[in-house]
Image: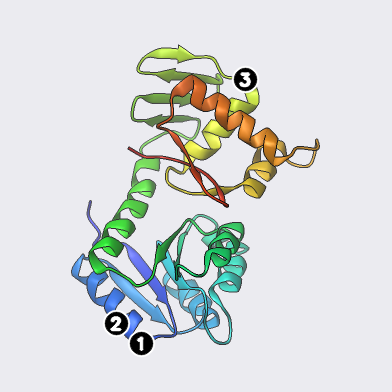
Amino acid sequence: MSTAKQKILIVDDEPDILELIEYNLKKEGYQVFLASNGQDGINVAKKVQPDLIILDIMMPKMDGIEACRLMRAIPEFKNTFMVFLTARSEEYSEIAGFNVGADDYIAKPIKPRALVSRINAILRRNASSEDVSENKLEIGDLVIDRESYLVYQAGEKVVLAKKEFELLYLLASKPGKVYTREAILKNIWEDSVVVTNRTIDVHIRKLREKLGENYVSTVKGVGYKFELS
């Protein structure tokens, strides 16, 4: 994958963290931009239009959660990848991050090789999604056709109920992205009916029964994601 033209913005108030991540991502071929707080991060993002933004959670002036929430409300950042840096003790912050539109998180202390590998994988999601039409997803041995509401696994048709199909399509449209239960409810059921977390869990179980256990994984305490093998 060529990274020469891909832009990454790092937003963190610790100079050592900025320097460490900047060095390793530049070495990988990315264009890297820096900001030291959430407000500056938003301003820099508007100027450079990054492909991916790495946000620390705890920062002065404006924290990463608020910065992500505000940027997701700006049309040009609706599909920008946003990744949080989080300590192990900040599980509540991980959940809050996913709730405001984060795509992933990277745990501290940062391990440079693991970080670069994760960033490469996240940006590959975008490259793979550009290779499919808007209404048809082809991922591994799955073909998911939104126009006909049909799913084929290794060439064999799999019969799904309407909501099962819509849930699968939502998760598969962004492999690796964690969808919170709240996001799933909003996208699939909207506000038309009363739906509980149990309803979502039942639909996930049905998908696993019909497709196998390898496609949809649970992120404990947060939600679900489609695994890109």
The colour scheme used here is rainbow
Instruction: Tell me, yes or no, if residue 5 can be seen here.
Output: no
For residue 185, what is the image quadrant? top right
Q: Give the distance between the C-alpha atoms of the residues marked 2 and 1, in whole angstroms.
A: 6 Å
Amino acid marked by disc 1 = Pro
Q: Nearer the viewer, residue 12 or 224?
A: 224
* Residue lying farthest to the left in this orientation: 27
Work out whether 184 lies above or below 94.
above
Tags 2 and 1 in contact by the CB under 8 Å rule? yes
Whole-percent x and y of residue 119? 33, 59
Q: Sequence order check: which comes first, mark 3 or mark 2?
A: 2
Whole-percent x and y of residue 20? 28, 78
Whole-percent x and y of residue 223? 56, 47
Q: Give the distance between the C-alpha atoms of the residues marked 1 and 3, in whole angstroms.
A: 51 Å
**Residue plotted at (40% across, 25% down):** 142
Instruction: Tell me, yes or no, if residue 82 can be seen here.
Output: yes
Residue placed under numbered mark 2 in the picture: 19
Residue placed under numbered mark 3 in the picture: 161
